[in-house]
Image (spheres, rainbow, N blue to C red):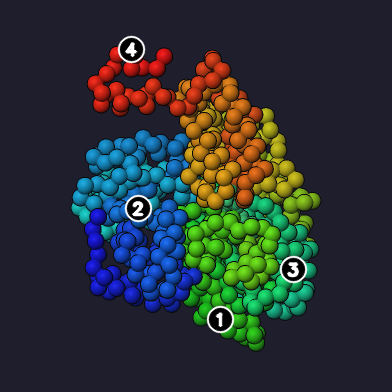
Amino acid sequence: MESYEFSQIEHQLAPVLEQHGCAVGQILQILVDVQEIYCFIPNEAITYIANRLGVPRVSVEGVAGFYSFLSLKPMGEYRILFSDNITDQMLGKNKLMHYFCKKQWLEPGKVSEDNLLSVDSTSCTGMCDQGPAALVNGWPLTNLDRQRLDLIADLIRDRKPVSSWPSNLFEVKDNIHRSDVLLGKLSAADTAIKAILDQSVATTLSEIEKSKLRGRGGAGYSTAKKWSGCCASQGLARYVVCNADEGEPGTFKDRVLLNSYADLVFDGMTICAKLIGATQGFLYLRGEYRYLLEKLEDVLTKRRTAGLLGKNILGEPGFDFEIEIHLGAGAYICGEESALIESLEGKSGRPRNRPPFPVTHGYHDQPTVVDNVETFVCVTKIAEHGGDWFANMGTEQSSGSKILSVSGDCARPGIYEYPFGISLQEILDDCGAEDAYAVQVSGPSGTLVSCKEFQRRICFEDLPTAGAFIIFNRDRDMLQVARNSAHFFAHESCGFCTPCRVGTQFQKKIIDKLTNGHGTALDLEELKNIGRIMKSMSHCGLGHTAANQVLDVLEKFPDAYKYKLKKHDFEPSFDLDKALEKARKITGRDDKWAHLP
Ligand SMILES: Cc1cc2nc3c(=O)[nH]c(=O)nc-3n(C[C@H](O)[C@H](O)[C@H](O)COP(=O)(O)O)c2cc1C
Ligand code: SF4
């Protein structure tokens, strides 16, 4: 491994540390920049950062080791990560990745001998409507096929910088096919904030209460209750955090909101700041959406110029608010609000004990509101049109509309916004899914719905969702669907608690065993047991939901598992005789007695 002189490290990293104010809370952001300079995190850089920040080396190394986009080993100058969501797989990701690797004489997961290229898989990159997708040095590549990969291979061979590659390779479309109250007509950026400045804080809060708005990040907690709870909490400061981690496979609606509706998101955050009395907000942007960073920074700059951020917003004395963008680095668990806060503080994203909840003990232990991107957009619209207007849409317990990320087997994948209460069948008709057999609502942590249940509705009373809507037709092997989710959760478990750390690994091994044709009925029972343990004993929501899809396939599509089963009751997952092969080779013995019966 190449080693670096102290003077070289200091020369390159001193400005990075200065730019981040030499703050311990900025360790993650500093490491993201270090990775951009060296294509990995050199050992010497860890020592330098630790010394400069005055923290133990292990604190920096721990963070660097936690996030999957940060690498402690050298990577290729060009680093390609193929998105491994089930929708990418359905569009031929595995074959394409192997085609590309073969062309380059490279194995997935390895670095080429000249250190030019490394290729690997990564969890869903949020481009499911235009996959197969990948990231090259963090920039999204969409609609990949052999022709595009041939072109990419040539560009890499000619060592063309990624910034000079043809722009059509990186085109990310919004693909909005149906808009309603949120994605429809855009008002001027200051409309909602002006509206709340004309009334008291209590009135605005009561409008939000009247709207019956529930969080769009999945759990559906009442927004008014959360914000009132934060107002009532004592602290030195209060904070607003927008959760743009969007890591649930199959979800990409926040990508579109940030790309084309960023002012509505920032309006919502600013309104929240006014109501709870916060002066600082953060947008936690998933590393996969790094390509949106400059665009979002530009929107923030324009807002500052327009008096919509900074001191005395729109001339209101004491209404001060700033927004800072923090980049994630490839960790699904950082979407969980307390893990997100840990990550914002520069640490590894491990979920905290809850209670206490962020509304009382959030960022640096101060009262903090964490809300989904779409929730803030809803707030902006409510501020503009009133609570009753919003409550009149949708169903009794689910007011307003929901933005869905539709992908999989349909003619028109993309973004669809509907009032709550829409049936699955109506959505399938709209997006051209003629032969739908199953729909995964809200990603692998959500609910798998079979074609017998397509009259069910998208709403908190029936099928709550954070937005993912993945369609499978009759030709799809549902065991492969379960396998994809088992691998995803095994990879994304943060490892903090045993039920999830071990359970997700067992789950993955059993599904692999079944896929390879070695499964037995006992393995199916074991899957159910592991699922029960993870659901009831895990520390956080990831573990509670990590078995959902595997168990739904077992319950609703039992044949997917059964046709792979061996007849006998049990077969160990570990093949002891095979493991002795090496010993047989060393000793030169391969007779009958050197084998187990
Ligand atoms: C493993 C895990 C991942 C999550 N990922 C996200 C996410 O990417 N975006 C999000 O808004 N909420 C996510 N959540 C939910 C958040 O913890 C939190 O409930 C949400 O941000 C609250 O916002 P809301 O009230 O506006 O929905 C996740 C939860 C878990 C357990
Ligand atoms: S449930 Fe999983 S992700 Fe959550 S704390 Fe435990 S190991 Fe980490």
The residue shown at (61%, 25%) is 558
Visible in this render: residue 241? yes
Viewer-proximal residue among 587 and 445: 587
Q: Which residue is mark 3?
A: 228
How crowded pointer 2 is (Cα within 10 Å; few <14, some 14-19, many 20+) is rated as some
How crowded pointer 3 is (Cα within 10 Å; few <14, some 14-19, many 20+) is rated as some
- Front of the two marks 4 and 2: 4
When the figure is inspected, residue 167 is found, relative to residue 307, above or below; the finding is: above
- Measured as percent of width and height from the top left, residue 88 is found at 45, 41
- Measured as percent of width and height from the top left, residue 117 is found at 27, 49
Horizontal side of residue 387 vs 310, given as left or right: right
Instruction: Check whether the beta carbons of the residues at disc 4 and disc 3 lie within 8 A of each other.
Output: no
Instruction: Check whether the beta carbons of the residues at disc 1 and disc 4 lie within 8 A of each other.
Output: no
When the figure is inspected, residue 42 is found, relative to residue 404, above or below; the finding is: below
Image quarter for ligand 1 equals bottom right
How crowded pointer 1 is (Cα within 10 Å; few <14, some 14-19, many 20+) is rated as some
When the figure is inspected, residue 597 is found, relative to residue 177, above or below; the finding is: above
Say which label, 1 or 4, has the lower sequence index.
Answer: 1
Say which label, 4 or 2, has the lower sequence index.
Answer: 2
Query: Which dot marks residue 441?
Result: none
Q: Which residue is mark 4?
A: 592
